[in-house]
Amino acid sequence: MKLTRNIAGWMFYDFANSAFTTVIVSVVYSAYFIKSVAAGPVGYGDRLWGLAVGLSMTLVAITAPILGAVADYSRSKKKLLFFFAYLTVLFTALLYFVKAGEVTQGMIFFIAANYAFNSANVFYDAFLPEVSPPADIGKVSGFGWAFGYLGGLVSLLLSLVLVKFNVRYVFPMIALHILVFSLFTLFWLREVHKPSRRTNYLRVAGTRIWYTLRHIARMPNLLKYLVSYFTYNNGIYTVIVFAAPFGTQRFQMGVQDIIVFFILAQLTSILGAAFFGWLTDRLNVKTSLSASLLIWIGVVVWAFFCRSATEFYGVGLVAGLAIGSSQANSRTLMSLLTPLARQAEFFGFFTLTGRLSSILGPVLYGWIALRTGDLRYSILSLLVFFVVGWALLQTVSLSRGTAQRKELDK
């Protein structure tokens, strides 16, 4: 793979925006919101945080197909990418002004930032086939993902310094991180200016979804896999948004402790991705993905019985092994079951499925926390997503699925 300036510019956006997922969604703001902004009985803050995440992702799921149609039919992908990127920067910076007790303001600013962040990714993803030759698209995507992990790690290290002074300093720092490193994308990423076509984007979005569903109905193994992915990804995303609040409330871990926890998890995720990548090549992607889901099941059970912060670090190290590998293998399996001539169509639906699966888990987690007053039962509820997702995955036949894919490629 030749690393061109165009590809490097595309990758730098992953380096820039991964700071938002890592620090705002996963580590610092989530814990700050639940412990300080929405302080109250056990489960109260978790319930509100789950609603904020669920609402923002619902808005994304509604508008993403329309934005995808805009990306394909207009000459404005780059403009819209940076419109939503700068909205992310603005509302992330505004989180600095959210103080203890300001629940409404804290939820509105986060919902706006998370919606803008995920909307920008619609256009970022749409650039991938444009910047990469077809033969290198997997490598470019993988290297972009890895570069994003590095960006998340850098932002965690900077956050570790700032929380010593004031945790709210972290939020404008993340906004600045996104702004500065996205400049490489602004100046280096080129857009192919295809003729703009005026159309009814809402109608195109609905037609696309219906068209894809009709094709999926002819591919039962792909359909089974998408149902499996929807199920277990609910569990994965809920861990991402609630791991830090769980540690701060259950074991009274400070923000610095949580940041160290996630730095260690980032390191083991690299090892996990390497090992499960080897396992995929040695056996097959379904076996590798199944193994990573079994690790997730073990992580949930261990978290339920976990009794100390030190032990919770161990849970994080093991979770790190599973998170990168399960996400990478999910995309790989989708690629194997998808007709080559319709990769963009099916991956657009795969992305939509992923966003839809980011709604139920967080909302359910917060509801259980509020009803029971015990976060252990909230974390245990995720067992359903991983067990059912794993069981559904076992019904997928790789051989029959790839045969069905080839039939549609004829």
Image (cartoon, helix red, strand yellow):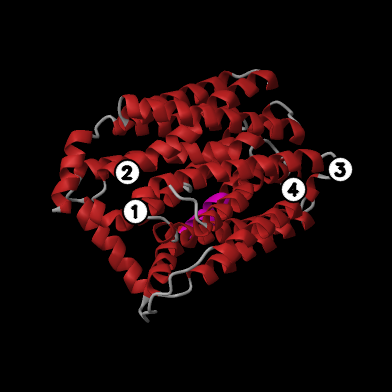
Disc 2 is placed on an element classified as helix
397 lies left or right of 10: left
Mark 3 vs mark 4: give the one in front. Answer: 3
Distance from Cα at disc 2 to Cα at disc 4? 40 Å
Mark 1 nearby-residue class (10 Å; few <14, some 14–19, many ≥20):
few
**Of the residues shown, which amino acid type is indicated by label 3?**
Phe
Q: Reading the chain from its start, which is encountered first: label 1 or label 4?
A: 4
Mark 1 vs mark 4: give the one in front. Answer: 1
**Residue 401, position as x, y percentages in the image:** 20, 40
The disc at residue 165 is 3
Is residue 149 something that shows in the picture? Answer: yes
Residue 390 is covered by the magenta coloring: no
Mark 4 nearby-residue class (10 Å; few <14, some 14–19, many ≥20):
many
Is residue 232 something that shows in the picture? Answer: no
Q: Are marks 1 and 4 in contact (CB under 8 Å)?
A: no
Mark 2 nearby-residue class (10 Å; few <14, some 14–19, many ≥20):
some
Q: Which residue is mark 1?
A: 134
The residue lying furthest to the front in this view is 2
Distance from Cα at disc 1 to Cα at disc 4? 47 Å
Residue 55 is covered by the magenta coloring: yes
